[in-house]
Image (tube, grey):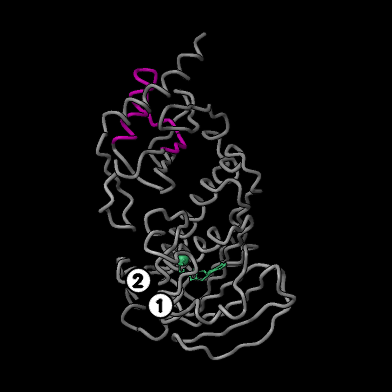
Amino acid sequence: SFISDKIAAGEVIERPLSIVKELVENSIDAGADSIVVEIRNGGKSYIRVTDNGCGIPAEEAEIAFERHATGKIQTLEDLGHIDTLGFRGEALASICAISRMTLYTRTAESPVGIKLEIQGGRICGKEPSGMNGGTTMVVEDVFYNTPARRKFMRSDAAEASAIIDFVQKMALYYANVAFQLINNGRNVLTTNGDGNYLHAISRVYPTKEFSNLMEIQGEHVHGFISDPGTTKNNRSGQIFFVNGRYVRSDVIEKGLMDGYGDRVFSGYPVALLFITVPPETIDVNIHPNKKEIKFLESGDIKKDIAAAVQKVIHSQDA
Ligand code: ADP
Ligand code: MG
């Protein structure tokens, strides 16, 4: 269709992480405030995402797996102000083409849910399902029908660790959503979804560096930082989101360190920073899977972050 032509194509499923990312983003878009992710063998053999979101009406469940089946944009106009994470309608179509999928879904209005089985893109089972409101997507045997791609997957441990990292970042950003993550039958993360960032941080990073953070607020930045004496020996505790996307950025790192100035004797303070800038001031040509970001007004951002950090550090002296 005309609309789908306007939407850049090409979001491919590269690895189990991509599947978890698409499914969790769909759960967020569905308004869920509870999301359970379960993986086995790094997601290669089994991925389950269960949410308590709006569900998919039974008559729409089958078309959700067709390409460009997005329930999220209706008009070209909508493209200008998208407020959902997904809008291309490609993810489910791509995932079900390369795996065995089972969908369970029920809307609040519907007395009973529906179970759909899809293999290699074809629907091969459909029956009613007694269940709570919301959606469960189960994805098994990733790339079972594309041996070449199966061969290029990383180790189970590497895939699991990338997925854990992703869910941790989501649990930090969406502190108002209760996340649970189960890896090979072991619970590895539980947040309570009470909306308090400090609570989410303490569940995601239950270490001393993150236990006594101070809140900062600038024009473009809001977040939490450690005191200058509480550091790690690498930057793994410096977590940045720009307009909702987890990023790495030299500019933000520099702004943060400038704010501490010579108060930091060694190592890297920890920080969880949420940066909000007008979308036209960041490089939008960056690949969706890359974590680097470019600011067009990098000096302003750096100064704003430094000032917000400095204010809190100096107020400690008083
Ligand atoms: P997109 O997210 O780009 O719209 P997807 O292929 O990811 O496309 O999903 C297709 C459609 O299926 C969505 O637009 C949405 O209407 C529906 N959907 C997918 N996952 C869920 C979910 N967890 N809860 C409710 N609806 C969902
Ligand atoms: Mg989607």
Check residue 262 for magenta coloring: yes
Indicate the position of residue 31 as horizontal and vertical percent values: 59, 58
Q: Which of marks 2 and 1 is nearer the N terminus?
A: 2
Indicate the position of residue 271 as horizontal and vertical percent values: 45, 34
Q: How crowded is mark 1: few (under 14 residues within 10 Å), some or many (20 or more)?
A: some
Indicate the position of residue 199 as horizontal and vertical percent values: 62, 40
| Quadrant location, the N terminus | bottom left
Magenta extent:
251-275
**Residue for point 52% across, 62% down:** 24
**Residue for point 53% across, 59% down:** 29
What is the three-letter code of the residue carrying label 2?
Ser
- Is the shortest distance between ligand 1 and the CB of mark 1 under 8 Å? no
Indicate the position of residue 32 as horizontal and vertical percent values: 61, 58
In the image, 96 versus 108, the foreground residue is 108
Give residue 45's mark.
Answer: none
Is 266 drawn above or below residue 17 in the view shown?
A: above
Q: Do the residues labelled 2 and 1 touch (CB within 8 Å)?
A: yes
- Left or right of 101? Residue 253 is left
Secondary structure category for the residue under label 2: helix
In the image, 143 versus 123, the foreground residue is 123
The image quadrant of residue 154 is bottom left
- Is the shortest distance between ligand 1 and the CB of mark 2 under 8 Å? no
Q: Which residue lies furthest to the top in this view?
A: 318
Secondary structure category for the residue under label 1: loop
What is the three-letter code of the residue carrying label 1?
Arg
Check disc 2 and report the residue beneath it. Answer: 4
Question: Depth-wise, is mark 2 or mark 1 nearer the camera?
Answer: 2
The image quadrant of residue 14 is bottom left
Check residue 91 for magenta coloring: no
Is 51 drawn above or below residue 171 in the view shown?
A: below
Check disc 1 and report the residue beneath it. Answer: 67
Q: Residues within 10 Å of mark 2 (few under 14, many from 20)?
A: some
